[in-house]
Image (cartoon, coloured by chain):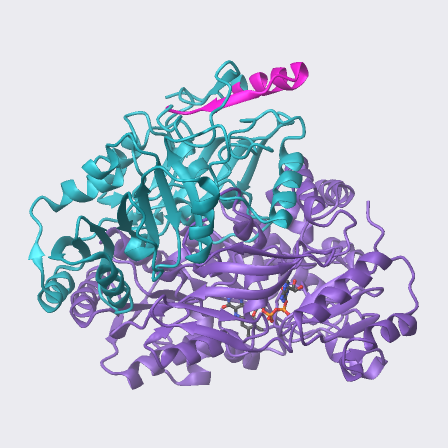
Amino acid sequence: MSNAGKRVDREALAQRFRQFIDPEYVISDDETLKPYECDGLSVYCEQPMLVVLPETVEQAQQVLRICHQEGVPVVARGAGTGLCAGAMPHPEGVVLSMAKFDRILEIDTLARAARVQPGVRNLAISEAAGKNGLYYGPDPSSQIACTIGGNVAENSGGVHCLKYGLTVHNLLSVDLLTVEGERLTLGSEGLDCYGMDLMALMTGSEGLLGIVTEVRVKLLPKPEVAQVVMAGFDSVQTAGDAVGAIIAEGIIPGGLEMMDGHAIVAAEAFAKAGYPTEAQALLLCEVDGTSEEVHEHIDAVESLFKRLGATSVRTSHNEEERARLWQGRKSAFPAVGRISPDYYCMDGTIPRGQLAHVLTEMDRKSQECGLRVANVFHAGDGNLHPLILFDANVPGELEKTEAFGAWILELCVEVGGCITGEHGVGVEKIRQMPAQFNDSEIEQFHRIKAAFDPAGTLNPGKGIPTLRQCQEYRSLDKDIEPNAGAAAQLHAHDHDHGQGGHHHG
Amino acid sequence: MADITNLLVEQVLAAREQKQPLRIVGGGSKDFMGRAVDMSLSELNLAEHSGIVSYHPVELVLTARAGTPLTELETALAENNQMLSFEPPRFGEGSTLGGTLATNLSGPGRPWWSSVRDQVLGIRLINGYGEHLRFGGQVMKNVAGYDVSRLQAGALGTLGAMTEVSLKVLPKPASTRTLVSDCELGEAVSIMNQRAAQPKPITAACWLDNRLYIRLSGAHSAVDATAAQWGGEELEDADVFWQQLRDQQLEFFSTDQPLWRFSVNPTARMPQLSGGWLVDWGGAQRWYSGAADFAEMEQIAKAAGGQVSLFRGGDRSGEVMHSPSPAAQVLQQRLKQAFDPDGLFNPGRLYSWM
Ligand SMILES: Cc1cc2nc3c(=O)[nH]c(=O)nc-3n(C[C@H](O)[C@H](O)[C@H](O)COP(=O)(O)OP(=O)(O)OC[C@H]3O[C@@H](n4cnc5c(N)ncnc54)[C@H](O)[C@@H]3O)c2cc1C
């Protein structure tokens, strides 16, 4: 099915690229290749054959043409902040780094749109648009570093997704290079297009269908005011009910985040945000809009929290207080990093109503396998980030952690959710795909892939498992209840582990 | 109100065996859309496959069979003070959920309240192999696998028969007011865009017959304050106006002339032409009523940064949807092959070559 992996001489290929790309930007020596070995999920490492950093679309096009001719795998790379090993190189392939495409080409203030190159950092768009009172909606926590090209490839989300949508909701058009090096534009300057929605298909396709070379995004007017209410609760269930109650009230908060007891304690120790450390759950509810609207809704949210039995309620009254209340949540990951040598960030989505059940089950399992877990939760849209605490230097602990993580994702599917809300499948969650999809669905995915990339050279081995893998995983799951020891062994076969790393999410 | 999945799958399998293409029909309210199809083809009728499968108001998620009429969904949502935020046009009693997604039709609030394509979370679909598949899900965020659900938006059923759709729904706004003022087209377009750039509770902006209509929705206090600030005459029976715009019942739409739909840059200046214009979506959607040459309309759309379709009437034997670039055409043909290798579903409805 795929001719990926056909042996090609590294230096000969590098020489061909150096004919049209600045030789300095064609990397072939081991030392300089090193930083490209992995993305933000550093347990998965692989040295690529070559890394190229083209500076023009024509150069990128030429790279693709040559690779296509030679059957050489191509792995696109943005900032490498991905958390599913999506940008992990292929050992016989070329990493196509889009880092040099870092220009904002146009800010169209009146039409509220920005045209940018794929290597532009997410936050840079909002910074540039800010002068005109506009910003780009999706705000992943990694926004100072991650690129818009990576955002498109992962359909990234952020704290403000419930109200302002994911990447897919904030794109107008995407320029692409196909695996053959053919250029095309999907979408337009208008809101809708005709025919199949290829732009939606491309969004979240993890670099498996094409290379993003330019993006036109929507810009939103900056809200007049934003205020945040923080509330502590003595049970996760009550906090979960409070989230439902806000929505039932007809309020869609700009951001609605939850943290469990472990995360609260860690965040407070780290950020001193004034969180109630005795609480079992904490909600941060941000309301934004016109000053009148925010005033009206903040009152409603405060009284609702009190009525539902919040043990403490605090509201920001200026930007400084607001920043402080968010500081704890924003530093939750580094904070957890301080109380444990390593942590592993998971990314399942569940129907919100299942939250208490899922957290209870997770607690039970956590005790059973002796690994602590702290939870931060995009409560508005049901996206759960359990952080499993472990020590990679303890033999077997990483494997145990991965097995626990896999168990959590399968639980998410069981309660009607999915294995990944925003981080993507990549290499990391390929094993859980059969839990969410049957063979016919997986096969349909392969046929889609083949429509774009018949030879299978774009980011091979990621995203969609082969049917053989699916059968293997299923038969193993039947035989082995995925807990500690046995599952750890089984996972050890799946991939070579690199150094147990720090995982931020 | 029944689940007739098995029957539908059987029909597809039989069609596959006999190499007999099918015409997918929901409520039949959009038969006028797309290219004229051979009416002698057998029907794959989804209307019977109807009913809400699950609805959890606090989750903001609704799942229904594809043949469920929009009216039934809207009644159920209204009981919980929620709505289909994309305000789908209802071209008749029978308009169904599946047809709405296949045609990707959204109403006046689209720039602010999203489109049906934006709100879809997951689907079930019978492909050309007669397999009943599930993609996406019933949760807000899901990036496992390719986004097959949104791919259907605008595909006019050419990739398969959707049997079930899950959607994100939204609360109804507490308050709504509509302001009207007199103004000519060019000025209206620039006012619409200026207002859309302000952080105010605007949820629709339309221009017709030298009148600019701006809808505000949200918290009472916010709507009132903005209305006072922006000024304009308050429109009585505003709900009726927006409903008639949404369902194309305004006088503008009751004409024998061909109706063209432009989806363009909201700030675009469009040429005068001899027919009539209606501007919606804050400038991003423009309706033109009048005879015209398809290729010329494509040029006009392109110059305005967008695309055009011959929405209703006119010559429906040629192309009616903006032509994709050659590369995008190849991709659509290959995708068609990937879902429906025998060309069973809606042949020729979307493009002459598909
Ligand atoms: C601290 C931290 C916090 C995070 N928080 C969030 C969060 O809140 N929400 C969230 O959604 N994610 C989050 N992430 C994950 C990550 O930042 C996102 O997935 C991001 O979109 C990746 O962008 P990147 O430029 O780093 O892409 P990379 O990691 O370089 O690549 C990601 C994938 O995109 C592909 N790709 C990259 N560029 C292109 C291109 N031009 N064309 C085609 N394919 C391309 C790659 O092949 C790869 O499969 C976080 C990560 C970290 C480290």
Q: How many numbered callouts?
A: 0
Residue B85 x, y percent position in the rendering = 30, 47
In the image, the chain rendered in cyan is B
Front position in the image: A5 or A264 = A5
User: Which residue lies at the image location 25% right of the left edge and 58% below the top edge?
Assistant: A251
Q: In which quarter of the image is ligand 1?
A: bottom right
Q: Which region of the structure is painted magenta? A: B8-27
Mark yes or no: residue B86 visible: no
Q: Is residue B15 magenta?
A: yes
Residue A236 as seen in the image, left or right of residue A199: left
| Percent x, y of residue A9 | 93, 68
Residue B31, x across and y down, in percent: 40, 26
Quarter holding the N terminus of chain B is top left
Residue B253, by quadrant, is top left
Is residue A499 shown left or right of residue A198?
right
Residue occupying image coordinates x 19% and y 60%: A307
The hue in which chain A appears in the rendered picture of the protein: purple
